[in-house]
Image (cartoon, grey):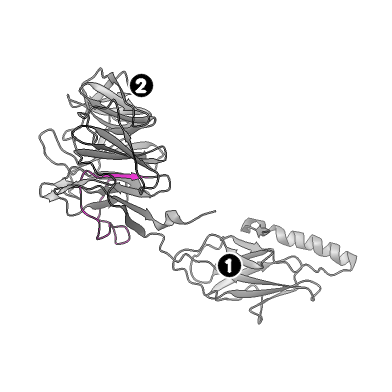
Amino acid sequence: MKTICYKIFLFALFPILALLCSCKEKNSGEKSTNATISYFAVKHTRLPIDSSTVFTIDANSGLIYNYDSLPYQSPKDSFVPTIFGRLLSKVLINDSIEYSGKDTIDFSNLVKLQSWAEDKKTTKNYVVELRIHTVDPDLYIWKQIKNNIYTETPVEEKAFYHNGQLCLFVKTASDITLYSSTDGKTWLPAAVTGLPTTASLQKTIKTTDGFCVADNGLLHQSTNGQQWTNTAINAPVSYLLFEMNKKIFALGTDNAIYTTADKTQWTNIGNAPTNFPENGAAISVDYSPNGKARAYVAGGETAGGDYLNSVWSTENGSHWVNLTDSTNYFSARTGASIIQYDGMLMLFGGKDKDGLVKDPHWISSNYGMIWTLPTAKITLPEGFQRRCGQSVVVDDTSRIYIIGGYTFGGFLKDVWTGKKNRFSFLIR
């Protein structure tokens, strides 16, 4: 299909080209027989709808359309079109209106254009389709895509997104199994070797090259999640927190923060803040608006077993800021999950002193400083079962996966997905 697509910045060249062609053809004494429309655009008379929307002109089928649809609920009436073609003598709109550059057109239905060449004999017919998104781009679509991933009786589980796959570690009283999936629906099991069942899956982290967890003075690591090796840790490291800027950061039994770049030499970079969680925290690392990697540590438990509702943030592991600054946005909780998504933070699930939290979904549009309950467009559906200890990850297509977790009735083995509609639109 031969397709011609012109942007507005080229429009300024058209009068010059037209003048040159006009002089040439007038000098030759012949009238142009070219009835092709080479540029089309629209502008709304009242609303600030983007007038730079690029329209594609299909020369073979005679269809003119905007490949990237206009925003959801945009009107189709009161548009003023701009139409251009080399040496056209006139253009008729819907067989009756002669184009003047000031006409207001309703595009609720297909609009017919008939262009006339300079010879006033040659014509070409077009149909204009104004495309508008029919679904709300800000609506999140949540659904359950898997009910039971595995049949074992677990004592712990943890999922990650790594190398284009969902990776779910399931630990029973006797062994650990890795389940992997590319779509969240079909899961393949594989035996895990070299990782003792004393190692905590909840304290396992994903690194650039695989997975790591600290256990009994050893650093266990794996590149594929199946085969694990270990090395001694030359520091009192007990809780791996996250990897950031190619360094692993961990909490020590002495309440200090330790870091390593080679997984061998660990350095004490200062004490953790007062009331910093030692277990059950929701942890996420992503890039902040200033382009720097930033870690977030939300909720969790202190050494004394007290639940927290703080949200700590750091860019270097040694300087920490309590973003909530003792403000009680959500109840103190442990076993929650946190992700960064579409320019905001999302907190999921957890349990508080009264049991499973009754408000399992919070959002922060300013990266952790103020938290609110999500709007109806974002919130989890009614069929979603409250839980704690779930894993929440985002894949390469901006799809959110909520995997497993547990209630006081036992472990859940399901998979829920969510995605903002806007991330499903195809943009050329």
Q: Badge 1 is on which residue?
A: 42
Residue 24 in which image quadrant: bottom right
Q: Is the magenta stretch mostly helix, strand or loop?
A: loop
Q: Which of 111 and 74 is in front in this view?
A: 111
**Amino acid type of the residue tagged 2 in the rendering:** Asp
| For marks 2 and 1 on the same chain, the one whose residue lies earlier in the sequence | 1
Residue 24 shows in the view: yes
Q: Can residue 283 be seen in this view?
A: no
Q: Which residue is drawn at 62% across and 66% down?
A: 64
* Vertical order, 270 against 12 (above or below): above
- Marks 2 & 1, CB-CB < 8 Å contact: no
Where's residue 245, x and y in %?
Answer: 38, 30
Which residue is drawn at the image coordinates 64% and 72% (left, top)? 101
Q: Quadrant of residue 194?
A: top left
226 above or below 45?
above
Q: Which mark is residue 253?
A: none
Specify whether residue 389 is painted magenta: yes
**Residue 72 position in % (x across, y down):** 44, 65
Q: In this view, does 358 lie to the left or right of 133?
A: left
Graded by Cα atoms within 10 Å as few (under 14), some (14 to 19) or many (20 or more), the crowding at tag 2 reads few
Q: Is residue 98 left or right of residue 406?
A: right
Residue 121 vs 172, above or below: the answer is below
Q: Distance between the residues labelled 2 and 1?
A: 58 Å
Mark 2 or 1, which is nearer the eye?
Answer: 2
Task: State whether residue 418 is above or below residue 18.
Answer: above
Q: Amino acid under label 1? A: Val
- Residue beneath disc 2: 262
For numbered disc 1, what is the local secondary structure? Answer: strand
- Is disc 1 surrounded by few (<14), some (14 to 19) or many (20+) residues within 10 Å? many
Q: Going by the image, does 120 lie left or right of 55?
A: right
- Expressed as whole percent of the image width and height from the top left, the position of residue 248 reads 32, 28
Q: What stretch is highlighted in magenta?
A: 368-394
